[in-house]
Image (cartoon, coloured by chain):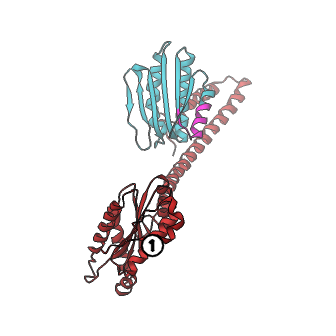
Amino acid sequence: MNQLYLASTSNTPEVDFDFPTRRLMLKGESYPESAAAFYGDILSQTAEFLGSLKNEDLQVIVQLNYFNSSSTKMLFSFFDRLNQAAEAGNRIMLDWHHDVDDETILEFGLEVAEDFPAIEFHAHALES
Amino acid sequence: MEQSPLIHPDLFEREKAVLDQAIMAHAQGPDTLHRPALGELIGEFERVIREMRRVIGHSDRTELELNIANVRLRELTEALTYQNRHDGLTRLLNRNTLIHEAERLLTRGPMAIILLDIDHFKQINDRYGHPVGDKVLSGLANEISKLVSYPGFTGRLGGEEFAMVIPTNDIRQAIILAEEASHSIRSLRSSTEEGLRITASLSVTIAPRGFSFEKLYLCGDDALYRAKHNGRDRIEIVWTPLGPMDENQTGKTGEHADQISD
């Protein structure tokens, strides 16, 4: 599978899913007009990719400093698919970056870690 | 507006798929005890999805508004911070900020202060009107701010009185600056009032690191008064070096101060 790359816009994050190197990154702000439309294709490509993995390592980097409720709903689907891939025997490492002052984003990350226990979760505080 | 999940992407695609399965199973029977329970589950599940859609839609709109409000708040805070530090007319530092910054600079090293007062400003206002007076003030502010660069700064102390502050232990540097300021003020011209000539009286004072700003300011003010008293349009220099040791006598430095005519 090839790389999936979308440059960031004022209301969508940078999407850098480098499937060949097993490294997926989401970075920026997320409040698209339609979160379902924005994430729909990303999620289906990711699902296809995850289905092809067998006992592999995958690094997922999330550095979102703001996302709205419908994006949250779509992100849950994303993490759920990652969790399934982890349960299927892959090692999924989630690097969760948050601003050092941003408790809200950190707490959301900790909840993700709790709800999707097969994913290896690492929080990273970024100095602003 | 209801969207068809077959064409449009949907936040609840997965939930809808499971729900459709349940609806099909429920429709096919057979009539067992599970059937009414499944029917009830379908109804509740549909309700949860519908309500979740409303909640998410509402949250998205609220978050967007909050986000916009946040940006505006940040812009307002920046504007207020600026207004709190600057003089509204001339956009130079205001009196409080200038004093505060000068006190801070003086704790870190030697500093020169040039005080500047426009000559016969009241007459300019009386004769040409306040709008012209305001233009003189902002024109002068523009000229003197061009002469001083960071970490030096300029400010309006009030009325027609201004200050230029530079970190230096070389009084000659401050004198050159005062002369440049005096010169550029003299060349200020009004586009509407041809006869208007502007001059200023200035004082130059220097102090070593750790000296009290209050005393430095008093000393400069004293010299500025002498510049006015001795005929205006001139620079009065306090040559006597002020030192932490001299603090007790700074009130008297005026007596030792030399003068140069401009």
Tell me where residue B191 sits by quadrant. Answer: bottom left
- Crowding around mark 1 (Cα neighbors within 10 Å: few <14, some 14 to 19, many 20+) is many
In this view, the residue in front, B236 or A107, is: B236
Say whether residue B175 is visible: yes
- Give the drawing colour for chain A: cyan
Q: Chain of mark 1?
A: B
Residue indicated by mark 1: B254
**Is residue B196 or residue B84 the one in the foreground?**
B196
Picture coordinates of residue B42, whole percent (x, y): 65, 32
| Residue B135 picture location, percent across and down | 35, 75
From the top left corner, tell me how far across and down residue B164 is, in percent: 39, 64
Q: Colour of chain B?
A: red
Q: Is residue B91 at all visible to an observer of this figure?
A: no
User: Who's the residue at 48% across and 23% down the image?
Assistant: A59
The residue at the point 48 percent across, 28 percent down is A61
Q: Is residue B152 above or below residue B89?
A: above
Question: Dividing the image into 4 quarters, which one contains the C terminus of chain B?
Answer: bottom left
Q: Residue farthest to the bottom? A: B127
Amino acid under disc 1: Gly
Q: Element under label 1?
A: helix
* Vertical arrangement, residue B48 with respect to residue A20, above or below: below
Q: Is residue B72 magenta?
A: no
Q: Which region of the structure is painted magenta?
A: A97-111
Q: What is the magenta segment's predominant secondary structure?
A: helix
